[in-house]
Image (cartoon, grey):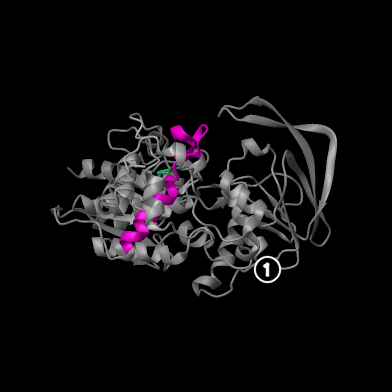
Amino acid sequence: MSTLDPFRFLDLPRQDLPKAPAQERASHFGEIYGDFPSDQAAAQSGRCLDCGNPYCEWKCPLHNLIPGWLSLVRDGRLTEAAELAHRTNPLPEICGRVCPQDRLCEGACTLEDGFGAVTIGAVERHLTDHVLERGWRPDLSGVRPTGRRVAIVGAGPAGLGCADTLVRYGVEAHVFDRYRQIGGLLTFGIPPFKLDKEIVKRRRMVLEEMGVRFHLGVEIGKDLAFHDLLADHDALFLGMGAYTPMRGGFPGEDLPGVHRALDFLIGNVRPQLGLGSEGHIDLRDKRVVVLGGGDTAMDCNRTAIRQGAARVTCAYRRDRENMPGSRREVVNAQEEGVHFLWNRQPVRILGHERVEAVEVIRTRLGAQDERGRRRPEPVPSSEEIIDAEAVLIAFGFQPSPPGWLARFGVETDARGRVLAPAAGRFPFQTANPKVFAGGDMVRGSDLVVTAVAEGRDAALGIVGFLK
Ligand code: SF4
């Protein structure tokens, strides 16, 4: 079979990355996937049809040039593939790990219908890891300094996407974050079994070598006045994320033993980062109920399993098909021992001194809501009780922009989202022309890749504004 055989997909089935057996991987927090050997990465890349109208590119929020870098990997030209991948994606090895590919690029692959999509995420991760481990760095030799400097508040995916793009246009990027590590949710929220923290550290090194300056452990509005930041820079980008948990609005949510997803995940990762055990929530030997159906709920499920919970039950109000999270993560959770209850909506959390059980009611799916998703409707008299010693609530997050932002003319909507339209003259510019914003702070909690894309596009808006 020739390496250029366009019908290679007929003989060569989709192969996923090697995955550790469920029992073994549930006993530690290390990443569960290994890497492709290079010949396998090339062979899997060669399955791409180069179909002329690549839906995968359109479905990828970054519009990555996927068939282009797949063909370079197929031909063993990994350095060129990395150059091309970085042209659109500042964090390819991270997106390759954490994107819900089945809902994005791979879900749109022509081969998905009957043959198995090309393993796009795995190849993106493989090619980037391969070249970075061998010392490759983005080539910025042609960049001419503009003498302009921009402050970025928040070192999460949106801020990093913005910083990477700015330095490529010769703009000094100064990233401020209240934590001493970069990454935001990449470091503190996403568990290490999905994203090893060494990967984020390596990306920090790459960005620093590209010229990005990090000012860590600095809280804007407390350690450094926003006014001074504004005065010292030609423009600002806000990428402060969304950290305020959404409430369910049912009785018992504040009982001892009921925890917010992010508190649990951050408390779990802090000791692994050498930051002490403050806030650690230990679920060993406990019967745990997780409420929610997104990727954060899956992270809670699988972290609880790794902590040694006696039983983990995940209740979600729609069916499996309509879960917002990645199907791959649901499969991983099931393999590791999580028990799912679909079509169950929480009614209340029961307990006296602390949580003792969760009452749920069965649902069926009714008419579509304004976002096109079918609404769950309770089935009368179908309540049931699930006993629980701990409950983790993962209903999503909303932004909580600091109150002082309004004093600088930055406007927000009723839900606290900063108003920064993507389609404005300068994308992601706020009502204060010098201030831009993107990521979860603007759209509410969403995917890592979406935040990276908005940070990148806001940087292009800033570059236009500075001209
Ligand atoms: Fe797919 Fe995400 Fe990579 Fe885009 S960034 S190609 S959606 S894995």
Q: Secondary structure at mark 1?
A: loop
Q: Amino acid type of disc 1?
A: Asp
Q: Nearer the viewer, residue 18 or 461?
A: 18
Provide the residue designation for mark 1.
Answer: 282
Q: Nearer the viewer, residue 57 or 405?
A: 57
Task: Based on the picture, tell me whether residue 115 belongs to the magenta stretch.
Answer: yes
Q: Is residue 7 above or below residue 306?
A: above
Which part of the image, by quadrant, shows the C terminus?
Answer: top left
Which part of the image, by quadrant, shows the N terminus?
Answer: top left
In which quarter of the view is residue 45 placed? top left
In the rendered image, the residue lying farthest to the right is 381
Task: Based on the picture, tell me whether residue 1 belongs to the magenta stretch.
Answer: no
Q: Residue at x 66, y 57 (%)?
A: 336
Determine the quadrant in which ligand 1 lies: top left
Give x and y (percent) for residue 417.
47, 42
The residues colored magenta run 103-132
Give x and y (percent) for residue 110.
44, 32
Q: Nearer the viewer, residue 55 or 398?
A: 55
Predominant SS along the magenta part? helix
Residue 429 in view? no
Q: Dot 1 surroundings within 10 Å: few (below 14), some, or many (20 or more)?
A: some
